[in-house]
């Protein structure tokens, strides 16, 4: 009869990833994009606009507004960003100051995933099969190696790449759910720490705009606790219940209870499947392999605890009509599950992952370098022409520091590929080194070599430069129905006073701004005369219409 444990790991295979290398890889993932760019369109810009409004005193802390319209109910993340903007006033640009705490939250998430996996891998059911004559991995060494793999898996996930570098409430929610599954994992070993973590995690999740998901995570955590074979974990369920009560109270105190449910129709299911596929790649494939290879232990802690995060995320994604931002809550759990696939992978599967990662990310890096060379020198001509066509009005700039960082990252990638293609087959985490390193490399290159064109395409600043000559700096702008991100851009980057309430056009503002994607522009509203129509240089589908109140009204 075969053993129910599929993991076979030698002591040499359980060596840990050198800490200097792991920290450098995390830094290459966390730091690029922290400085040198504006908040980008949509959610990132909207969140920053709310933080800036709170920090500048243009709105209240308890009921933040953008243009007089109530904003998102995720108060805790917006308070955090506003506090850092206030602390950095005078010496740190507001976008950078707001980005700092969210970078720290992402770093904390990586650390929590490591410790969660470490505690789960220490349990007897998660340990590898003992050998007849010894030589199997020591429990602590094995747990460290699996935890290293979990951090690499999380950094390799495509869905985290953009959302993990924004200043949006979802990043705070990600950190909170990571703290909760850490509490469940550490309950048998760090009793007091686990209790404090649970009492903090669910209220923080609720205060970050997801009270219903906090209660769902709490219910799933209670099931895990009550079914546990550890007496101290079963008692831990009382603390989870208490955390649920605090989360409900937090949601009420911060007025965060707001249902965002949408009904999925059958025609949307293929799109939902595609979203799941790319957003959770590659950890979803490894997580499914884990569930198959460890299928006899689905109720054990090392699988049940990360499934709390995954189940909450998938349920929230479906309930919210396929919202990709709900899926981010499942990434910590998927990374933990993916790590337990590593000691069960066949050599052929590991080799396939290596070759795919090496070819794919090397090709991406070469493409980034070629386009960068074209922007700087005009050679090759076709990429340079493509940039000029896609980014009209963009003037390339040169940064020696960005070039040096890109060269260093590229050299590190070449070294990493040479190391991995050498005779290094022992370490259990080896199969995720190239995927994680490739994602970090491409992000580094994008945030150095391509940062000026990306910022030009996604920042609101180019549009604001076109509006500045058309609108007096002291103007009051009526903007009923304008998207929150556009209102934030007008307030923060334009410095105008904006009234976005539905009745704003009938009040005292002297200018009216509207946005349309219709091919035929609408007629001016009664009492207003057209001033200009402006298009973002990189967006020819949306037109911004500017009107002035008629003198003879």
Image (tube, rainbow, N blue to C red):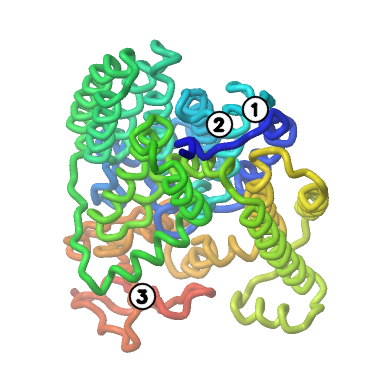
Apparent side of residue 231 relative to residue 23 in the rendered image (left or right): left
Q: Is residue 529 above or below residue 397?
A: below
Q: Earlier in the sequence, mark 2 or mark 1?
A: 2
Quadrant location of residue 533?
A: bottom left
- Residue 6, percent across and down? 51, 40
Query: Residue 279: which disc?
Result: none
Q: Secondary structure at mark 1?
A: loop
Q: Nearer the viewer, mark 3 or mark 2?
A: 2
- The quarter holding residue 88 reads top right
Is residue 77 at all visible to an observer of this figure?
A: no
Q: Quadrant of residue 132?
A: top right
Give the percent coordinates (x, y) of residue 211. Answer: 24, 37
Image quarter hosting the C terminus:
bottom left
SS at mark 2 in the image: loop
Q: Residue at x 22, y 71 (%)?
A: 266
- State the CA–CA distance, disc 2 to disc 1: 8 Å
- Asked whether the residues under the numbered discs 2 and 1 touch, taking CB atoms below 8 Å apart as contact, a structural biologist would say yes
Is tag 3's residue or tag 1's residue first in the polypeptide sequence?
A: 1
Residue displayed at 61% across by 49% down: 33
Q: Is residue 150 above or below residue 247?
A: below
User: Which residue has dot 2 on it?
Assistant: 128
Q: Are marks 3 and 2 in contact (CB under 8 Å)?
A: no
| Residue at numbered disc 3 | 545
Badge 1: residue crowd in 10 Å (few <14, some 14–19, many ≥20)? many
392 to the left or right of 488: right
Which residue matches tag 1? 136
Residue 473: percent from the left, percent from the top? 44, 57
| Between marks 3 and 1 in the image, the one whose residue lies nearer the viewer | 1
């Amino acid at each position: 009869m075969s053993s129910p444990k599929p993991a076979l790991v030698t002591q040499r295979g359980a060596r840990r990833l050198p800490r200097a290398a792991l920290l450098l890889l995390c830094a290459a993932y966390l730091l690029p994009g922290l400085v040198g760019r504006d908040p980008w369109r949509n959610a990132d810009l909207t969140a920053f606009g709310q933080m800036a409004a709170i920090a500048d005193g243009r709105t209240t802390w308890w009921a933040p507004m953008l243009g007089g319209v109530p904003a998102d109910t995720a108060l805790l993340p917006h308070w955090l960003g506003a506090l850092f903007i206030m602390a950095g006033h005078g010496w740190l640009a507001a976008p950078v100051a707001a980005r700092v705490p969210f970078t720290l939250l992402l770093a904390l998430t990586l650390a929590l995933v490591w410790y969660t996996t470490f505690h789960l891998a220490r349990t007897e059911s998660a340990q590898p099969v003992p050998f007849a004559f010894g030589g199997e991995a020591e429990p602590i060494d094995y747990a460290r190696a699996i935890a290293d793999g979990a951090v690499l898996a999380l950094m390799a996930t495509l869905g985290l790449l953009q959302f993990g570098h924004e200043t949006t409430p979802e990043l705070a929610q990600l950190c909170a759910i990571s703290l909760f599954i850490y509490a469940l994992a550490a309950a048998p070993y760090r009793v007091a720490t686990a209790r404090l973590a649970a009492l903090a995690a669910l209220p923080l999740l609720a205060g970050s705009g997801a009270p219903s998901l906090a209660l769902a995570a709490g219910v799933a955590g209670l099931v895990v606790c009550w079914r546990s074979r550890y007496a101290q974990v079963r008692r831990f369920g009382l603390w989870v219940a208490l955390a649920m009560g605090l989360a409900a109270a937090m949601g009420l105190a911060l007025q965060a209870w707001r249902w965002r449910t949408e009904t999925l129709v059958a025609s949307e299911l293929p799109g939902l499947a595609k979203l799941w596929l790319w957003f959770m790649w590659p950890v979803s494939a490894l997580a499914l392999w884990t569930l198959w290879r460890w299928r006899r232990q689905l109720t054990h802690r090392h699988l049940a605890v990360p499934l709390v995060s995954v189940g909450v995320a998938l349920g929230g994604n479906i309930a919210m009509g396929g919202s990709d931002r709900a899926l981010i809550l499942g990434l910590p759990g998927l990374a933990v599950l993916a790590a337990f696939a590593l000691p069960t992978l066949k050599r052929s599967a590991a080799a396939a992952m290596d070759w795919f990662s090496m070819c794919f990310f090397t090709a991406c890096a070469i493409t980034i370098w070629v386009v960068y060379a074209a922007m700087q020198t005009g050679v090759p001509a076709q990429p340079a022409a493509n940039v000029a066509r896609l980014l009209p009005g963009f003037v390339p700039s040169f940064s020696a520091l960005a070039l040096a960082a890109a060269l260093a990252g590229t050299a590190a990638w070449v070294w990493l590929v040479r190391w991995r293609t050498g005779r290094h087959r022992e370490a259990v985490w080896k199969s995720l080194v190239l995927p994680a390193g490739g994602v970090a490399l491409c992000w580094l290159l994008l945030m150095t070599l391509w940062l000026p064109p990306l910022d030009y395409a996604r920042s609101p600043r180019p549009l604001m430069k076109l509006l500045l000559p058309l609108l007096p700096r002291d103007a009051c702008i009526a903007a009923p129905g304008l998207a929150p991100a556009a209102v934030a851009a007008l307030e923060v980057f334009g410095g105008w006073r904006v009234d976005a309430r539905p009745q704003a056009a009938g009040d005292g503002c002297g200018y009216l701004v509207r946005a349309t994607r219709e091919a035929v522009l609408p007629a001016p509203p009664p009492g207003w005369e057209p001033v200009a129509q402006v298009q973002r240089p990189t967006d020819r589908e949306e037109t911004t219409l500017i009107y002035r109140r008629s003198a003879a009204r």
